[in-house]
Image: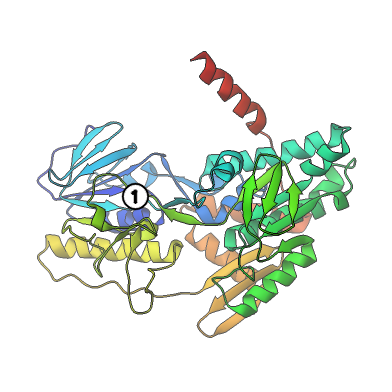
Amino acid sequence: MNIPRTNLPRVVIIGGGFAGMAMLRKLIGEDVQTVILDRHNYHTFQPLLYQVSTSGLEPDSIAYPMRKITRNSKKCLFRMAEVKSINPEKSLIETSIGDLIYDYLVIATGSKTNFFGNKSIEDNGMWMKTVPQALNIRSLILENLEQAVITDDPELRKALLNFVLVGAGPTGVELSGAIAELKNHIVPNDYPDINPNEMNIHLLEGLDRVLPPMSEKSSRKAHEFLEELGVKIHLNTMVEEYDGHLVTTNTDLKLKTETFIWAAGVTGAPVKGLKAEAMVEKANRYEVNAFNQIKGYDNIFAIGDIALMQTQEYPKGHPMVAQPAIQQGKHLATNIMNIVEGKKLEAFKYKDKGTMATVGRNRAVVDLDKGSFSGFLAWFIWMFVHLWFLIGFRNRLVTFFNWLYNYWNYDKAARLIIRPFKGYEKQMKVDKEEI
């Protein structure tokens, strides 16, 4: 790995998501050698991935180079690598680019899409956890619109213009709202051969309301906003199968679609090598104590989505969202320095700053301790908070001007098929066969 030798304690962080980045930034300037590993060379601001997938933003607006963080300190290093396994007995990790010894190991690998064992959805559906996946969805949406223009098969045209999203959490709600705005403002101008009324957006949810983690008031308001935009909501509806063309549910509802997006849940993304008892199997997350130490280990920690810290207020662990990850990352950085300096560890306490989701232009819902509100003010607060937490001045500036342009012009400037999804998949298959 070409990591310089040092007499300083070595802290290795696996994962450059919210938790890993928060910890890394807090350790810059401290007397430890910090090495952060990630399979990508950039940090992704995941809450805005849906805007990349619906042509609202370009990917470089929400991605930030990891090396721009580490370049300001000789004691902080980044390596692009995939971690294969952990050897706790030797305090060593095995990666795609070599092995590395650690003094303190922090697992911040986040979460991955949960298909709940449904192989047909995993094989044929689309999901959105990374920038490439968001670009795949963008290409697929635009390609299907292009194909709908030229097909003379009415059944295929209907399937191409049917958009089915599963899971009415924040991701599903925001995605369906963004696609509805694409239908209402872009399709009439860009695709005069398509009647916008032909385009249908279906949002399926297994529970009895949208945005289940939020208050009932916010849930009701989000439901109203979605219906105003033309989204068809199907509650108490669970998908049983998607064969690539037909969606089958637990009700009489069956939908033919060429665009099926799965946003129904996440699960932890653990690394091989730790004891089985360290893992909470149902959640696929590491069990940690109040100091984020993984059960059974003193020098191995977990933060963010991969960590399950059970408390009286959160018996099932903290929500798998950005704020707990950021707060745990910063807190663990302080505790690592407490260990190095021989000080007492401080227990982590999560400060809930509220929950929010946007449905579209001037439409959002916000839950705070003092109550819930919706509409333009909630939408404005949502924009401000997301701009604030974007890393890098350029990212904030580009995102702000994109939003400003989209707001005044009812436009989505990034509707480009840079990498055709269908053609790309076919070419990948050909390349694989040739190999």
| Number of marks drawn | 1
Secondary structure under badge 1?
loop
Q: Residue furthest top?
A: 434
Picture quadrant of residue 48: bottom right
Residue on which the image places disc 1: 270
x, y percent for residue 313: 38, 79
Foreground of the two, 337 or 93? 93
Foreground of the two, 305 or 256? 256
Colouring scheme, one of rainbow, by chain, secondary structure, one colour: rainbow
How many C-alpha atoms fall within 10 Å of the one at disc 1: few (<14), some, or many (≥20)? many
Work out whether residue 375 can be spotted.
Answer: no
Which quadrant does the N terminus fall into?
A: top left
User: Which amino acid lies under the numbered mark 1 shown in the image of this protein?
Assistant: Pro
x, y percent for residue 239: 63, 54
Q: Is residue 345 left or right of residue 73?
A: left
Q: Residue furthest bottom?
A: 370
x, y percent for residue 178: 69, 55
x, y percent for residue 116: 50, 52
Picture quadrant of residue 363: bottom right
User: At 76% across and 60% down in the image, what residue appears?
Assistant: 231
User: At 66% across and 27% down in the image, what residue appears?
Assistant: 423
The correct choice, above or below, for 2 with respect to 270 in the image is above
Q: Is residue 175 left or right of residue 408?
A: left
Foreground of the two, 168 or 122? 122
The correct choice, above or below, for 397 with respect to 415 in the image is below
The correct choice, above or below, for 114 with respect to 119 in the image is below
Q: Is residue 211 left or right of residue 193?
A: left
Work out whether residue 82 can be spotted.
Answer: yes
